[in-house]
Amino acid sequence: MKVLLKVLLVALVYLSACTTTRETSQFESEKVQEFIVERPLPYPIDLPPQFINAVNKGTRTLTGEPGENYWVQRADYMIDAEIIPEDTLVTGSVQITYHNNSPNDLGFLFLELAQNLHAKGVVRNEEVEVTGGFNIHTVTSNGDTLTQRSRLSPGEPAYGIEGTTMLIVLNEPIPSMETGTVSIHYSFKIPKRGASARMGYNKDNLYHLAYWYPRVSVLDDVNGWFTDNFTGNAEFYHDHGNYQVTFTAPEQWIVMGTGELTNANETLSELIYDRYINAGTSDTPVKIVTKNDFGNVTHQTETGTITWNFTAENVRDVAYSFVRESNWDGMRTPVGDIDNDGKTDYSRINAFWRETAPLWNKSAEYAAHSISYLSEYTGFSYPWPHMTTVEADGIIGGGMEFPMITIIGSYNNAGARALYDVTAHELAHMWIPMIVSTNERRHAWMDEGSTTFHEAQARWDYFPGSYNLTQEFNGYLRIAGSPAEGEIMRWSDYHYPGPAYGVASYPKPGSVLIALEGLLGKETFHKAWQTYIDRWAYKHPTPYDMFNTFEDVYGEDLDWFWRSWYFETWTLDQSVSDVKTIDGIGEITIEDLGRIPMPVDLFIKFEDGTSEEIRIPVDEWLKGKTSTTIEVAASSPIILVEIDRTGYFPDTDRSNNKWEK
């Protein structure tokens, strides 16, 4: 009955519309036209209550700097693990020393068990191989063994697990500015393409381990404990810390990953070790391991296994690749003067790749350029002893970043240029989020958009002929303003199905940074960008800290920009509507057909060959206008007017950006 009633109502409305008089129809048409030309005005950004609370407590500021009372937690890890390839098994123990820098005593800790994405019955947003996740054998708090319970009570030491989250009620609270220790013995079966193709194994000669140990969740000054479960898509949020890692693997497997390999002479065979040392001082790639070396790359032992030792400082995670029958190219690359002693510092570059990925023969060069270039561009020198790229075709098609190491597909079909692009992209992540530690699970755009922007800068330097700003907008413009688009500020795991998450995380925020550079000018933008990275290195910025930093450096309120680009799905479409030259005066009419207000950068050319560049300020559109006319002195007739000739702004329709006589 309700359906029938709805049909009848629709029919009545349609019949009423058909019998409306001509005058009424014209009136309604005028009213519709009046509605269409009205534009929404971007209203100020509403700071979340929890951010305002942090400002009031002095941990954040409205200028984008960390407050005088800012604090960030740290956790140091000692991990002893073994990989057993024939059983696709990892066993390990981790001792966590947690530094409570918060102003409150802590009676419990939250931990993330990302590997539990592969446990039976866990909530996830995509199909994955069910391998059981973590098997937790023992948990101790300050030396006392805890039991697992389904219900936990404050003050009763125990632990519980739900999804990818573990809660430990400590036997002794960790006082403010003190430390506490938790130890966990665990094991897990390695999924073939785990954590949504971010780890796993391929054939019988490659393993990559990530999210392979229990780690403490983030407790920050804005949101408190971060306990969002890992459901497979949106990535990670981690504190920094120091790591001591020992990994035991069968001989003839090379282990490389986060941290400095401190016992290379005890693990690598004499020949391979000599080449490894030489590569560390070479400005061109050195072939450390080739096909002819397979079977003789490590020492031989009575047990058939070798233990590899790594030390890492100030990293937010650790990951490791285990390769057998991979080529290994190595070299060094300059990263600036880290110690301010007037000498150039270098980082080691490693590239591991199999014969089935021939394009990788230049991967070490690609990585070296990316690390050196981005050290200079960001104004923040790459701080770690090496950067390693690993060809992991069969585990991943694109790339995935971890501190000091990334796994990338073969790119056989995509070509060498695409392999450079993905290399630059993954290595750009060493700055965001590996140094500037953003919350990827809530705001993927903060790292992926920044990295998309950095990737373009590095590409244009390596391939100078590829410079094209408007090409960078294509990934965003293909769905701009359509129902498929989602707001950049929408939480990462809550985007609409389809391309909304990808576009809002990668090409759109990358495009918006280019637009911001066009708005502020290269020099001011670059200063603000480097200031943001320097202020928030090894800390946890929110989007509002980034916004406030840009306003602080620029010296003007930019709420209209943030609102329009980050909080809405409005579009930009500026048009040259009319051009006249009368009695030495040129009249140029610009229409703003979109909803995003931006200044209008005009290039005007006159018949006598002279030209002029003018910026119409954004204030014209912030008054609510959709059209504006400017006058220019024109002793010679105007023959061309073009909007945004340099291509900095992602305009949805450039066909109306140019007028020619």
Image: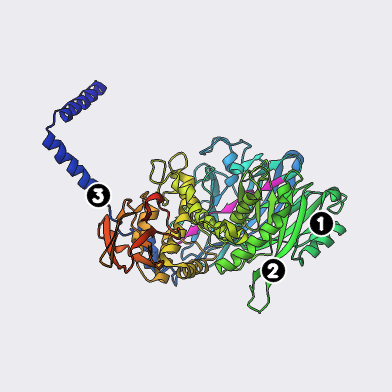
Q: Quadrant of residue 427?
A: bottom right
Residue 171 lies, in percent from the top left, at: 55, 55
Q: Badge 3: few (under 14), some or many (20 or more) residues near its Cα, within 10 Å?
A: some
| Relative depth, front residue between 225 and 176 | 225
CA distance for labels 3 and 1 = 72 Å
Query: Identity of the amino acid at label 1?
Result: Thr
Q: Looking at the image, which residue is at 52% across and 69% down?
A: 534
Secondary structure beneath label 3: helix
Question: Which residue is most to the bottom?
Answer: 342
Q: Badge 2: few (under 14), some or many (20 or more) residues near its Cα, within 10 Å?
A: many
Residue bounds of the magenta highlight: 207-221
Q: Is residue 29 above or below residue 471?
A: above
Q: Looking at the image, which residue is at 51% across and 51% down?
A: 156
Q: Badge 1: few (under 14), some or many (20 or more) residues near its Cα, within 10 Å?
A: many
| N-terminal label among 3 and 1 | 3
Q: Quadrant of the C terminus?
A: bottom left
Residue 528 lies, in percent from the top left, at: 46, 68
Q: Mark on residue 267?
A: 1
Secondary structure beneath label 2: strand
Specify whether residue 516 is painted magenta. no
Query: Identity of the amino acid at label 3?
Result: Val
Q: Which residue is mark 3?
A: 37
Q: Which residue is mark 2?
A: 346
